[in-house]
Image (cartoon, coloured by chain):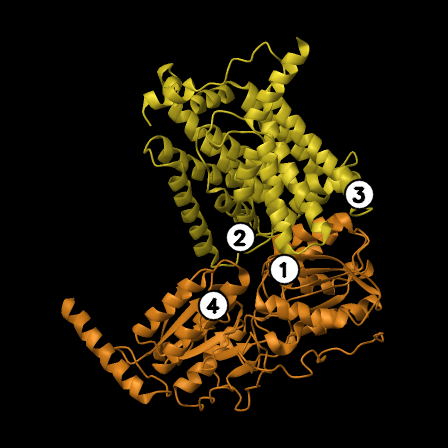
Amino acid sequence: MSVDQRLGEAGRMPADTRGTSRLSGETVTIGVIFALTVAMILGSRVISPAFGGWNQAETILYLASFLVFCSFGQGLVILVRGLDLSIASVITLGGVLTTTWLAGDNGDLVFILPAILVVCTLVGVASGIGVSLLKVPPFIMTMATGIIVYSLCLGVTRGTPRGYPAPVLNDVMRAELAGLPVPILVLAAFVAGGFLLQSYSTYGRRLYAVGNNPAAAHVVGLPTVRVTIGAYAISALCAGFTGIMLASYANGATLRMGDDYLLPSIAAVVVGGSSILGGKGNFLGTVGGAILLTTLATILSALGIEQGWKTIVEGGVILFALMVLREQVYEALRTWMGSERR
Amino acid sequence: MRTLKTAKTLACGALLAGTTLAAAGPAHALTDDGRFLIYLSLSYSGNSWQSEAANIVKALAQTPPYDEMVELVEVISGTDPQAQISDYESMIAAGADGIVSFPISSTALNRVVRRGCEEGVLFFMYDATVTEQCAYNISYITSGFGENTAQALVNAMGGEGKIFLSRGVPGNSVDERHTNGAMHIFDQYPGIEVVAEYYSYWDDRTTQQETAMALAAHPDVDGIWAQAGEFGAIQALLQADPNRLVPVTGENSNGFRLALANPDYQAVGLAGVSAGSPPAQSGYAFKLMMEILQGQREPLPVGERNIEYPLPWVPADAVTLCEGDTFADGCNAFPEGLVPGSFVTEVFNPVLLPELSLASALEGEPTPGATIQPLPADVVVAAPNEPGINCQRCEPPADLYSLTKVEPTVEPN
């Protein structure tokens, strides 16, 4: 893509609406997503009397946490105009290493867990180098690293990953602290940390700069290569972490454990209001997207309808959410609110 | 190089011509060094069950005297029938003597299988089946997993309560067969209410997630009928409330068997039975094929090639831990730590496959010192007709869903 083209894209900026309203599109998206989720949870009481309460919310948060972990990394990569297709394989890698290296032993946990995360991060660094230095399209690069990593797992384990995660990890997944399940507390800490990193740190601002206009970012002297590699590295780190959590949750690893997270991680980011083309997005939106998708799955599962209809409804709701949350709708909303004030 | 290729092509052509003349008989298209050329054709690799089944065949092929007789080539086709069709075509063209295979579709492969049969290739399908009658199907599918486990669940629940159905892959003929068998039983008990039915794709982790969701809506469930992936159902129950377990029936994962035998779990309500698909079917299929190829056993007539593998049946009180790394003395589960929870225990069969050890299933390694033992002469048990599964236009027997492993202890209404 030439500089001209990129500038051309930037040139198609929406009309200047500052001053008409303090309401930003991002805030609306996040608000709408969370409102929709709460409405769905409360409304689901109609389906089952056990629904609509804290227990259901707890299950949803618990199951959504895995998706949130890997979607954060996916979000950063998408922010810098990329796409990480290696997520599924790196989740598997994290899970397989958790069971094989720990082998059901608590002993060296403090050394092994960081080691697993380092190995996973290196996979991301490799993808990042391919994308930013060798200029391989992200789609191809991450697909390649994903296939290689998966094949290594398959070859080394010969199809049957051995061992168990450390018992203490499995206990942590079932433990409660101050009346809350520990994984939900981990989720809360992760969301806070991720949000600060993406929206308030220097590195986060650089990601937006590179995603918005890589050429301009380069011209003003930002280390675009390092920033891009960093995004892929963090994505792989998060995927590895997801793998550790999943293996602890399931008390074992399988080679297909990451497969269910690749497309949902992209969907969570996009439903959460980020642009698939990069440069725009907010982690809280992604968190909302992940929780919304999980809520939807939980409710559909309780509806007792045919599998075919289930997936049709699921697809329909995702499409509906994307249509409603489109930029034009905010524009209309802003204009409308602006005219109301006048 | 080129001359070699030409020579091979010529040899191939000659063999093909020869086998076409020989029609239905075995091909004996031995390779250069006089070995049988056998293909192991898999759907996909990457879950414990598929890997174990493949490893068993690999281990047997390296066990004397097969190690001197067999050239085994493994081909993985993925989940797309089209890919397996073209792989079969290549194997036939390469002059295969036999193809041991997990078929991806029960109907889509028929044409190429028939063509292979006409060229003298032996087809031995394990676990999954094809409806083409010239292929041998070695499968437990007809052995009544669905109805027997359903009855065991009903018995354990006293004939009343809410249940989940954790199914396999939507639209799959095996899943349909199991579920139909189970519903045949559940429908006889008005006190049994199916409150949630979900597809778990025969995968532990998916089962755990789907069961967790169903538990959110129905925390008061009284029993779970599961196909493969049942270890995940146990994990989900433990996660939701470690002090309230319910009866679960499922397949053969080691983790499930250990859980069934765990007195702490039994005390809080876990009961059930472990049955279902044994990876050992692949080894049985391979040995049967080798005996026919070597002329030790007469080929079965076309139309009588559906062979039933006995249904493993291990209730909680029958779980016994193996001391060593084989299924010696009737043991049927391994201590925790030796194998992962998702490991499918039914890899061995002391009668049909005494050659195997744990290393065979995990690594595909032959057992040191073992030699191939002949199958019992009267080993073959004919499987009943199941339309769409092992025959095309055929009638199922009237007693298709009759119970074979368990008696009702609660009277149906």
Left or right: residue B227 versus residue A146 is right
Front one among A163 and A257: A257
Please name whichever residue, B164 or A253, is drawn nearer the observer in this view of the structure. Answer: B164
Residue located beneath label 4 in the image: B54
Q: Position of residue B257 (x, y in %)?
A: 68, 65
Residue underneath mark 3: A45
Q: CA distance from mark 2 to mark 1?
A: 13 Å
Label 2: how many Cα within 10 Å (few below 14, some 14–19, many 20+): some
Residue B322 seen in the figure: no
**On-image quarter of the C terminus of chain B:** bottom right
Q: Secondary structure at mark 4?
A: helix
Q: Chain of mark 2?
A: A
At x 53% / y 59%, what residue is drawn? B47
Q: Position of residue B321 (x, y in %)?
A: 66, 68
Q: Is residue B344 visible?
A: yes
The image shows a total of numbered marks equal to: 4
Label 2 belongs to which residue? A256
Answer with the quarter of the image where residue B26 lies.
bottom left
- Which chain: yellow? A
Within-10-Å neighbours for mark 4: few <14, some 14–19, many 20+: many
Q: Amino acid at mark 2?
A: Arg
> Are circles 1 and 3 on residues that touch, CB within 8 Å?
no
Measure the alpha-carbon separation of dots 2 and 3.
34 Å
Residue named by callout 1: B229
Give the CA distance from mark 4 to mark 2.
18 Å
Q: Quadrant of residue A45?
A: top right
